[in-house]
Image (cartoon, coloured by chain):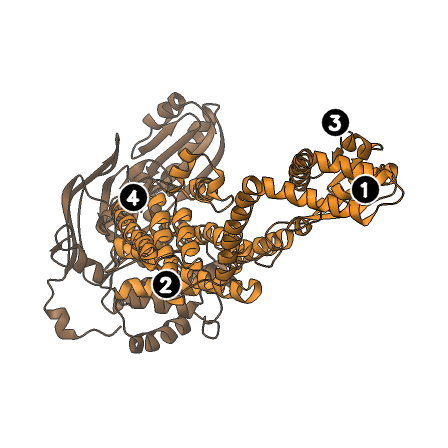
Chain colours: A brown, B orange
Amino acid sequence: MIRCPIFFKLRSGLMLKISHLSKSFDKVQAVDDVSLEVKEGEIFGFLGPNGAGKTTTISMIAGLLTPDSGTIQIDSMDIRSSQQKIRSIMGIVPQDMAFYEELTANENLRFWGQLQGMSGTELDQKIPYYLNKIGLKGREDEPLKKYSGGMKRRINLIIGLIHSPRLLLLDEPTIGIDVQTKINILDLIREASSQGTTVVYTTHTLVEAEELCDRIAIMDKGKILALGTLKELIQIVGEKDIALIQGEFSADQAQQIISQEKSIDVITLKDGYLAISLDASKKVPGLMKSFFNSGISVNDISLKQPNLESVFLKLTGKELRE
Amino acid sequence: MKRVLLLTGKDFKRKWKNPVVIIGFMLIPLLFTFLFGFVFGSSQENIMPTVKVLSVDLDDSLVSRLYLGSLTQGELKDMINLQAVSGEDEARDLLDKGKASALLIIPSEFGEKVWTGNPAEITLIKNPSEQFLPQIAEEITETTSLVFSALLQIFSEEIDQIRKFSEQKDISDQIISDLSIMMKDRIGEIEKYVFPPVVSIKQMTQEKDEEAEEVGYSVQSYILPAISIMFLLFICNIVFEDLLREKEKGTLLRMSISPLQISEFIWSKILTSALIGIFCTLFLVGLGSVLFSIDWGRPGLLLVIILSLNILIAGFIAFLYTFIQTERQAGALMSSVIVVMALLGGSMVPISNFPILVQKISRFTVNYWGLEAFRKNIMREPVSQIWLIILGMLVGGLLLSVASSFLLEKKLKKGLYR
């Protein structure tokens, strides 16, 4: 995992450059004019709900899908003309457990490492190092089918990391795992990044994106709605909180009440559901009083302080879990 | 090539760790061979089964005894096991219990009718619970009755004399001498018409038998390769199921973001299936020699036959997979295709039993060519004929593999990322 410092100096500092990338399937626009740049060693996250276009974007970066238009450059090489070279510096951790369950951890890591061109000596050093890191030392000779779900997830990640790729694509690698395994996986990703690996990470978990990513692109319906650091994204909602109100009211009734209040921005409004941006401490009591005076019953109100979730809500008008 | 070998090694390791299905597929041909050998006899000479026939002689005359005796003469004694039973009821009871394949009843006054030249009838009752053996009994008794009737007609004059003499109490030496001279003269008259063709036919048949015995073409020599080829197709199919499974599971996706080419992945499957097939065939051939004393013919040629056959099988199965989209389709379609191919190609029934048109279709099956190669080597037919089949299998296998690699590459690349 140790890289030569001179090697870094020769680099432009830009690992991934995407320009006006679009892809559609039949009549569905999966990716719509996406442009972005990712620096070497950066952890870049694609955040969005299912169907936002994250996986399609990743698969085009991996060279598995041909874009309808736009270009992708990896380490200053065009993906169409230098696919073979690019593959040798890339690694992937797919959503699926992409390994052989009949084989042991040792056999799997050795096979995938050799496939990436690693020598036996290199593997002799790296396999114990990684197994130790993920707490599976001593169980390396057991077939993976005997492992728990969390252990399998960790092996799935290590297979993508073993050959120290310069660009690592991670497609929701923490789906369905326990907190301890998640912490372990996120630590390994940070370590890889600190040693020079550029990480492109897709997730629909806000906390993960907040904790892990240096920069985040919020995607929905194939478009990038916002892109920046966590701090930059939170500025989109400013100092305002988000209030989610559910009750027995029509959209017209709620609109009538809101229009009487100042400094409240409506994010989503439909029968029985209202999402608004406001200074909660000053505005919520008055608002509740107005609802009460109008004879409207409010069943639930939740407040969200400025964070990635509120940014997502503000940008898309919906919660990420929807 | 290095990566193809790496993938092949990995697949070998996987199959080695989970060998149950392959071992099962190897045991079935051995079991079939054992059962067929058990039913039809294991020695090379005794391919035909012995038919057990019960006889009830209600006449108990010289003629009836002569007739029953004729059924156990010469080669017939190897085919018919004739067991005399005293009463018809007892015989029917034994037949009901499945103790015999047929029951032959000779009615009373049978001998008298024969002596007087009147039509005489023998009853044959077949065991309804059997199909094959009673048929043999019927054929044999029909033929024997025909020959017996012909002989009675030819020697009618002499038989009449014998009948008259048999009625006399004292038969002088002169009478026997006259009768012998008369019989000799009659045989002399008819021998140029009857005996030469019979003798020559018998000689031809015997020569063929001797040849078959010499090269050791037994029931097992046919059954084991025939069933083995069918199950080699199934074993090869197991390896190719991984093509779709690896796509489904994401390992192919992972490989496609590595220096590996998809075509290398496909070739690794072809190589793996051919190698596993070769190992399985060698195992079956070895056990065939040990358990069933099968003489497989020239060993060098046998090895080349095994190699080329498995290349053909791998190429053929790979080609079939170019038409298959999902694992479910593979499960349903491949078994049907393999069974139909086995039926047409002679793995289940010798193709000589098929109509000419079907025999021609058989030539388009892997089973046919594999079986032909094994048979010709066992029968020690000219080497040039065997090499021609080997060449055909090699070229066919390689062409199918190249075509499959090209077509499957396109197919596998589609929809890798869901």
Residue drawn at (33%, 30%), measured in percent from left and top?
A261
Residue type at mark 2 is: Leu
Residue drawn at (41%, 38%), measured in percent from left and top?
B359
Based on the displayed image, in which of its 4 quarters is residue B140 positioned? top right
Point out the tag, 3 or 1, that comes first from the N-terminus. 1
The chain that hosts pointer 4 is B
Residue tagged 4: B411
Crowd around label 3: few <14 · some 14–19 · many ≥20 (10 Å): few
Front residue of this view, candidates A233 and A47: A47
Q: Which numbered disc covers residue B62? A: 1
Residue drawn at (30%, 68%), measured in percent from left and top?
A114
Based on the displayed image, in which of its 4 quarters is residue A191 positioned? bottom left
The extreme front residue here reads B174
- Same-chain status of marks 4 and 2: yes
Residue tagged 3: B119
Residue type at mark 3 is: Pro
Point out the tag, 4 or 2, that comes first from the N-terminus. 2
Residue tagged 2: B301
Point out the tag, 3 or 2, that comes first from the N-terminus. 3
Query: What SS does tag 1 mark?
Result: helix
